[in-house]
Image (spheres, rainbow, N blue to C red):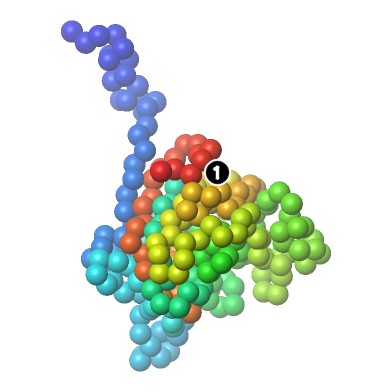
Amino acid sequence: MLRPEKLLFLILIFSGSVSFAQTVSLFNGKNLDGWHVDVPEMDEDESAINPFIVRDGMLVSLGTPQGHLITDDTHQNYRLEVEYRFAGEPGNCGVLIHASTPRSLYEMFPKSLEVQMMHKNAGDFWCIVEDIQVPDMEARRGPQQDWGITEGKGRRILNLTDNSEKPPGEWNRLVIECLSDKIKVWVNNDLVNHGTNCTAQSGQIAVQAEGSEVEFRKLLRTSISQLSEESPK
Protein backbone atom coordinates (compact mmCIF):
# COMPACT_ATOMS: atom_id res chain seq x y z
CA MET A 1 0.00 0.00 0.00
CA LEU A 2 1.26 3.47 -0.87
CA ARG A 3 2.01 5.77 1.99
CA PRO A 4 -0.24 8.89 2.07
CA GLU A 5 2.54 11.30 1.09
CA LYS A 6 3.46 9.21 -1.96
CA LEU A 7 -0.19 8.92 -2.96
CA LEU A 8 -0.58 12.70 -2.68
CA PHE A 9 2.56 13.21 -4.79
CA LEU A 10 1.18 10.97 -7.55
CA ILE A 11 -2.14 12.78 -7.46
CA LEU A 12 -0.36 16.12 -7.85
CA ILE A 13 1.68 14.84 -10.78
CA PHE A 14 -1.31 13.51 -12.68
CA SER A 15 -3.37 16.60 -11.92
CA GLY A 16 -0.64 18.82 -13.35
CA SER A 17 -0.01 20.59 -10.05
CA VAL A 18 3.64 19.52 -10.00
CA SER A 19 5.96 20.53 -12.81
CA PHE A 20 9.57 19.67 -13.47
CA ALA A 21 12.14 21.92 -15.10
CA GLN A 22 12.90 20.65 -18.58
CA THR A 23 16.30 21.43 -20.05
CA VAL A 24 16.83 21.03 -23.78
CA SER A 25 19.75 21.84 -26.01
CA LEU A 26 18.76 24.18 -28.82
CA PHE A 27 21.76 22.98 -30.85
CA ASN A 28 22.30 19.28 -31.55
CA GLY A 29 26.03 19.54 -32.31
CA LYS A 30 25.56 18.17 -35.83
CA ASN A 31 23.48 20.51 -37.98
CA LEU A 32 21.13 23.48 -37.88
CA ASP A 33 17.93 21.49 -37.41
CA GLY A 34 15.43 23.58 -35.44
CA TRP A 35 16.85 26.85 -36.77
CA HIS A 36 16.50 28.95 -39.89
CA VAL A 37 18.82 31.52 -41.41
CA ASP A 38 17.83 35.10 -42.21
CA VAL A 39 20.70 36.84 -44.02
CA PRO A 40 19.56 39.60 -46.42
CA GLU A 41 22.67 39.33 -48.61
CA MET A 42 21.81 35.72 -49.40
CA ASP A 43 18.54 36.83 -51.02
CA GLU A 44 20.13 38.36 -54.10
CA ASP A 45 23.77 37.22 -54.15
CA GLU A 46 24.04 33.56 -55.05
CA SER A 47 27.72 33.60 -54.09
CA ALA A 48 27.00 34.81 -50.53
CA ILE A 49 27.87 32.17 -47.97
CA ASN A 50 25.77 31.06 -45.04
CA PRO A 51 27.59 32.65 -42.06
CA PHE A 52 26.30 29.99 -39.64
CA ILE A 53 28.09 26.66 -39.73
CA VAL A 54 28.79 23.62 -37.56
CA ARG A 55 32.46 23.01 -36.80
CA ASP A 56 33.95 20.47 -34.41
CA GLY A 57 30.59 20.01 -32.72
CA MET A 58 30.15 23.75 -32.15
CA LEU A 59 27.79 26.28 -33.67
CA VAL A 60 29.89 28.99 -35.32
CA SER A 61 28.87 32.45 -36.44
CA LEU A 62 31.43 33.55 -39.02
CA GLY A 63 30.37 37.17 -38.59
CA THR A 64 29.77 37.97 -42.26
CA PRO A 65 27.60 38.34 -44.20
CA GLN A 66 25.54 39.81 -41.42
CA GLY A 67 22.25 38.34 -40.34
CA HIS A 68 20.60 36.01 -37.85
CA LEU A 69 20.11 32.36 -37.04
CA ILE A 70 16.64 32.03 -35.54
CA THR A 71 14.88 29.18 -33.75
CA ASP A 72 11.88 27.73 -35.49
CA ASP A 73 10.04 27.50 -32.17
CA THR A 74 8.93 30.30 -29.87
CA HIS A 75 9.85 30.28 -26.18
CA GLN A 76 8.40 31.74 -23.00
CA ASN A 77 9.39 31.64 -19.31
CA TYR A 78 12.82 30.10 -19.65
CA ARG A 79 16.49 30.25 -18.75
CA LEU A 80 18.96 30.33 -21.63
CA GLU A 81 22.51 29.28 -20.86
CA VAL A 82 25.07 30.17 -23.53
CA GLU A 83 28.79 29.37 -23.56
CA TYR A 84 30.68 31.32 -26.21
CA ARG A 85 34.06 32.71 -27.17
CA PHE A 86 35.46 34.88 -29.92
CA ALA A 87 37.41 32.57 -32.20
CA GLY A 88 39.71 35.32 -33.44
CA GLU A 89 39.73 39.08 -32.98
CA PRO A 90 37.04 39.90 -30.39
CA GLY A 91 34.24 42.07 -31.69
CA ASN A 92 30.48 42.13 -32.00
CA CYS A 93 27.70 39.58 -31.66
CA GLY A 94 24.53 39.13 -29.64
CA VAL A 95 21.67 36.91 -28.54
CA LEU A 96 18.16 38.08 -29.37
CA ILE A 97 15.21 37.09 -27.20
CA HIS A 98 11.46 37.47 -27.82
CA ALA A 99 12.19 37.75 -31.54
CA SER A 100 9.25 37.99 -33.92
CA THR A 101 8.78 40.03 -37.11
CA PRO A 102 11.90 39.64 -39.30
CA ARG A 103 13.85 42.60 -40.68
CA SER A 104 11.99 45.15 -38.58
CA LEU A 105 15.03 47.37 -38.01
CA TYR A 106 17.51 48.50 -40.67
CA GLU A 107 15.96 45.84 -42.93
CA MET A 108 17.94 43.18 -41.06
CA PHE A 109 17.16 42.90 -37.31
CA PRO A 110 14.02 41.05 -36.21
CA LYS A 111 11.75 42.72 -33.69
CA SER A 112 13.27 41.60 -30.39
CA LEU A 113 15.34 42.53 -27.38
CA GLU A 114 19.07 42.02 -27.82
CA VAL A 115 21.36 40.84 -25.05
CA GLN A 116 24.68 42.21 -26.20
CA MET A 117 27.80 40.02 -26.48
CA MET A 118 30.06 42.69 -27.98
CA HIS A 119 33.51 42.52 -26.41
CA LYS A 120 33.69 44.72 -23.27
CA ASN A 121 29.93 45.38 -23.50
CA ALA A 122 28.44 41.97 -22.76
CA GLY A 123 25.09 42.29 -21.02
CA ASP A 124 23.91 45.58 -22.50
CA PHE A 125 20.30 45.61 -23.67
CA TRP A 126 19.51 46.86 -27.16
CA CYS A 127 15.85 47.62 -27.88
CA ILE A 128 14.86 46.42 -31.35
CA VAL A 129 11.26 47.57 -31.83
CA GLU A 130 10.60 46.17 -28.34
CA ASP A 131 11.26 48.01 -25.09
CA ILE A 132 12.20 47.35 -21.47
CA GLN A 133 12.71 49.38 -18.29
CA VAL A 134 15.63 49.29 -15.85
CA PRO A 135 16.57 51.29 -12.75
CA ASP A 136 18.53 54.51 -13.38
CA MET A 137 17.22 54.71 -16.93
CA GLU A 138 18.61 58.14 -17.77
CA ALA A 139 22.07 57.26 -16.46
CA ARG A 140 22.12 54.05 -18.47
CA ARG A 141 20.17 55.07 -21.59
CA GLY A 142 20.82 58.77 -21.98
CA PRO A 143 18.37 61.70 -22.07
CA GLN A 144 14.76 60.56 -22.01
CA GLN A 145 13.84 62.65 -25.05
CA ASP A 146 16.20 60.48 -27.12
CA TRP A 147 14.76 57.12 -26.09
CA GLY A 148 13.12 54.99 -28.73
CA ILE A 149 12.99 51.56 -30.29
CA THR A 150 13.54 52.31 -33.98
CA GLU A 151 16.27 53.71 -36.21
CA GLY A 152 18.18 56.68 -34.84
CA LYS A 153 16.74 56.45 -31.31
CA GLY A 154 18.41 55.77 -27.96
CA ARG A 155 18.02 52.00 -27.98
CA ARG A 156 21.05 50.97 -25.89
CA ILE A 157 20.77 50.34 -22.14
CA LEU A 158 24.16 49.95 -20.47
CA ASN A 159 24.91 46.95 -18.31
CA LEU A 160 25.64 47.13 -14.58
CA THR A 161 29.26 45.97 -14.46
CA ASP A 162 32.59 46.17 -16.20
CA ASN A 163 35.22 43.46 -16.51
CA SER A 164 32.81 40.53 -16.24
CA GLU A 165 34.09 38.97 -19.46
CA LYS A 166 36.96 36.50 -19.69
CA PRO A 167 40.10 37.43 -21.68
CA PRO A 168 39.75 37.02 -25.46
CA GLY A 169 39.90 33.38 -26.52
CA GLU A 170 38.49 32.05 -23.24
CA TRP A 171 34.94 30.76 -22.80
CA ASN A 172 32.26 33.05 -21.38
CA ARG A 173 29.04 31.90 -19.75
CA LEU A 174 26.00 34.03 -20.48
CA VAL A 175 22.76 33.25 -18.62
CA ILE A 176 19.48 34.93 -19.54
CA GLU A 177 16.27 34.40 -17.61
CA CYS A 178 12.95 35.50 -19.07
CA LEU A 179 9.81 35.31 -16.95
CA SER A 180 6.65 37.14 -17.92
CA ASP A 181 7.82 40.72 -18.65
CA LYS A 182 11.06 40.44 -16.60
CA ILE A 183 14.57 39.64 -17.81
CA LYS A 184 17.77 39.00 -15.83
CA VAL A 185 21.23 38.54 -17.32
CA TRP A 186 24.45 37.17 -15.84
CA VAL A 187 27.90 37.09 -17.44
CA ASN A 188 30.32 34.66 -15.76
CA ASN A 189 28.12 34.68 -12.63
CA ASP A 190 27.98 38.51 -12.39
CA LEU A 191 24.50 40.04 -12.55
CA VAL A 192 24.89 42.47 -15.44
CA ASN A 193 21.30 43.48 -16.21
CA HIS A 194 17.77 43.22 -14.84
CA GLY A 195 14.82 44.72 -16.65
CA THR A 196 11.06 44.78 -16.19
CA ASN A 197 7.97 45.76 -18.19
CA CYS A 198 9.37 44.28 -21.38
CA THR A 199 6.93 44.85 -24.20
CA ALA A 200 7.21 41.20 -25.31
CA GLN A 201 6.94 38.09 -23.16
CA SER A 202 7.65 35.34 -25.67
CA GLY A 203 9.19 34.79 -29.07
CA GLN A 204 11.98 33.13 -30.94
CA ILE A 205 15.63 33.07 -29.91
CA ALA A 206 18.33 34.19 -32.34
CA VAL A 207 22.10 34.54 -32.55
CA GLN A 208 23.79 37.11 -34.71
CA ALA A 209 26.40 37.30 -37.40
CA GLU A 210 27.57 40.85 -36.81
CA GLY A 211 31.17 41.14 -37.88
CA SER A 212 33.18 38.78 -35.67
CA GLU A 213 33.63 35.02 -35.61
CA VAL A 214 32.08 33.47 -32.50
CA GLU A 215 31.96 29.86 -31.35
CA PHE A 216 29.06 28.51 -29.30
CA ARG A 217 29.55 25.25 -27.44
CA LYS A 218 26.39 25.37 -25.35
CA LEU A 219 22.86 26.68 -25.94
CA LEU A 220 20.60 25.24 -23.25
CA ARG A 221 17.02 26.26 -22.54
CA THR A 222 15.30 25.40 -19.26
CA SER A 223 11.67 26.14 -18.38
CA ILE A 224 11.37 28.28 -15.22
CA SER A 225 8.58 29.49 -12.95
CA GLN A 226 10.60 32.05 -10.99
CA LEU A 227 13.70 34.19 -11.48
CA SER A 228 16.92 33.19 -9.77
CA GLU A 229 18.35 35.34 -7.00
CA GLU A 230 21.90 34.39 -7.99
CA SER A 231 23.47 33.11 -11.17
CA PRO A 232 22.35 29.50 -11.71
CA LYS A 233 25.25 27.06 -11.54
> Does 7 sit above or below residue 107?
above
Residue, disc 1 = 180
Quadrant for the N terminus in the image: top left
Give the residue at x 36% y 74%: 52
Residue 180 makes an appearance in the image: yes
- Indicate the quadrant where residue 15 lies: top left
Please give left or right for residue 214 compared with residue 94 in the image: left
Residue nearest the viewer, comparing 80 with 230: 230
Amino acid tagged 1: Ser
Give the residue at x 71% y 67%: 154
Near mark 1 (Cα within 10 A), the count class, few <14, some 14-19 or many ≥20, is some
Give the residue at x 34% y 42%: 22
Please give left or right for residue 209 compared with residue 7 in the image: right
Residue nearest the viewer, comparing 229 with 8: 229
Spot occupied by residue 74 in the image (x, y as percentages of width and height) = 43, 55
Spot occupied by residue 73 in the image (x, y as percentages of width and height) = 39, 57
Spot occupied by residue 213 in the image (x, y as percentages of width and height) = 41, 76
Q: Is mark 1 on a helix, strand or loop?
A: loop
Quadrant for the C terminus in the image: top left
